[in-house]
Image: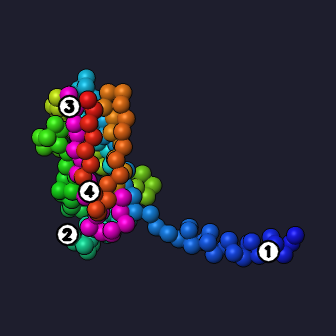
């Protein structure tokens, strides 16, 4: 019985270590329609190292987030990039997103956006191209809550836009 366990361990060990070294390229975004406030509230979670990489490539090789080296211009680059890469249409009309701010949580940056006033809608189209210019393996997961209905989208390089109907 021991040789079988040893053989199994020898076969499985490389597979387990290889899986732990694989990097995931994922962002998650929560969109919620708050009817009392006529507001569309958006929170995106992005890995800091990935967003730093893309900001360094696009704007400045010295971009540094969540460190003592972070400059005011670095957070401006983050704002500019997110507002260029993330768009929402309600019932076919593009809405203006306001950048509320960002905060750091472990190895993630949480970006807060909001659109007000927003009338109730039946259809939402989300374009999320965040980090798609960094790697083709990037996936952007979107969770949308409209009243009591929850739906999700997975966007990627091939499909950076998603459309949901809440009729």
Q: Is residue 66 visible?
A: no
Q: Secondary structure at mark 3?
A: loop
In whole angstroms, how far apart are the C-alphas of marks 3 and 2? 36 Å
Toward the viewer: 164 or 119? 164
Give whichever of discs 2 and 4 has the lower sequence position.
2
Mark before the other along the chain sequence, 4 or 1: 1
For marks 3 and 1, the one nearer the N-term is 1
**Residue that lies at the very extreme toward the right in this rendered image:** 1
The image quarter containing residue 157 is bottom left
Query: Upstream in the sequence, badge 2 or badge 1?
Result: 1
Dot placed on the residue nearer the N-terminal end, 3 or 4: 3
Find residue 29 and report its horizontal and vertical position in percent: 34, 47
The correct choice, above or below, for 45 with respect to 12 in the image is above
Q: Nearer the viewer, residue 24 or 71?
A: 24
- Residue 121 circle label: 3
Please give the name of the residue rendered at 61% of the width and 72% of the height, measured from the top-left corner.
15
Dot 4 lies on which element?
loop
Q: Which residue is mark 2?
A: 59
The majority secondary structure of the magenta stretch comes to loop
Of badges 3 and 2, the one in the foreground is 3
How would you rate the neighbour count of disc 3 (Cα within 10 Å): few for under 14, some for 14-19, many for 20 or more?
A: some
Q: Position of residue 142 (x, y in %)?
A: 34, 47
Question: How packed is label 4: few (under 14 Cα within 10 Å), some, or many (20 or more)?
Answer: some
Q: Which residue is mark 1?
A: 6
Can you give x and y, in whole percent of width and height, for residue 127 in the image? 23, 51
Q: Which residue bears the numbered disc 4?
A: 160
Marks 2/1: CA–CA distance: 52 Å
């Amino acid at each position: 019985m021991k040789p079988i366990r040893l053989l199994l361990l020898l076969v499985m060990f490389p597979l387990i270590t290889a899986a732990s070294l694989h990097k995931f390229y994922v962002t998650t975004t929560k969109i919620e329609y708050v009817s009392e406030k006529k507001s569309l509230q958006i929170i995106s979670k992005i890995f800091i190292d990935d967003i730093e990489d893309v900001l360094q490539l696009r704007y400045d090789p010295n971009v540094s987030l969540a460190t003592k080296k972070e400059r005011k211009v670095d957070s401006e680059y983050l704002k500019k990039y997110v507002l260029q890469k993330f768009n929402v249409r309600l019932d076919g009309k593009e809405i203006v997103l306001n950048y509320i701010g960002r905060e750091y949580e472990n190895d993630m940056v949480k970006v807060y956006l909001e659109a007000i006033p927003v009338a109730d809608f039946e259809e939402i189209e989300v374009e999320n191209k965040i980090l798609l210019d960094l790697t083709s393996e990037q996936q952007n997961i979107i969770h949308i809550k409209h009243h009591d209905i929850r739906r999700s989208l997975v966007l990627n390089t091939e499909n950076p836009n998603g459309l949901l109907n809440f009729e």
